[in-house]
Image: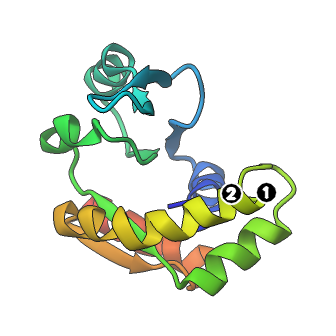
Amino acid sequence: MSGTGKSSVLRVLAQRGHRVVDTDTDEWSEWTVDDEGEPDWIWREDAIAGLLAGHDGGHLFVAGCRTNQGRFYDRFDAVVLLSAPAETLLARIDDRSDNPYGKRDEEREAVLRHLEQVEPLLRATATAELDATAPLDVLADRLEQLADA
């Protein structure tokens, strides 16, 4: 979900020496068209499979929300949903300067629609949910604990 702090907590985890991958780039994701003819930003399955197969030391933290991510769930130790209220998400999107997404009205409407429609689907398949209003160090601690479990 946009604005939950995925990129920010990845930066903290990287500073702690972990390998982190934000899949919101062309290296890891690509545009396609879904069964209903709508554009869909999905994981490049060969790239993700290679990432997971090639990682053999320490913890790997992967962030992203794609319609085909469930195909890889059995290869993750945990699938974590970071969640926060709509007001928090929109305020963070307003404040961030490293990502333009969510600044336009139609994008903000999409964020709210995803919160209503997509987040429940993510919650149903997640193995853990963390309150993304917690400080970043606390979120990183909790993610490390999940990785160590």
Residue 12 visible to an observer of this rendering: yes
Q: Position of residue 107 (x, y in %)?
A: 67, 56
Mark 1 neighbour class, 10 Å CA radius: few under 14, some 14 to 19, many 20 or more: few
Q: Position of residue 127 (x, y in %)?
A: 19, 66
Rendering quarter of residue 9: bottom right
What residue is disc 1 on? 104
Task: Say which of 17 and 13 sits in front.
Answer: 13
Q: Position of residue 81 (x, y in %)?
A: 36, 66
Relative to 105, 25 lies left or right: left
Looking at the image, which is closer to me, 24 or 102? Answer: 102
Q: Residue at 32%, 14% (x, y): give it.
A: 46
Q: Are marks 1 and 2 in contact (CB under 8 Å)?
A: yes
Q: Residue at x 58, y 53 (%)?
A: 10
| Residue type at tag 2 | Glu
In the shown orientation, is residue 25 left or right of residue 80?
right
Q: Position of residue 97 (x, y in %)?
A: 87, 56
Residue ID for mark 2: 106
> Real-space Cα distance between discs 1 and 2?
6 Å
Point out the image quarter for the C terminus.
bottom left
Q: Nearer the viewer, residue 60 or 29?
A: 29
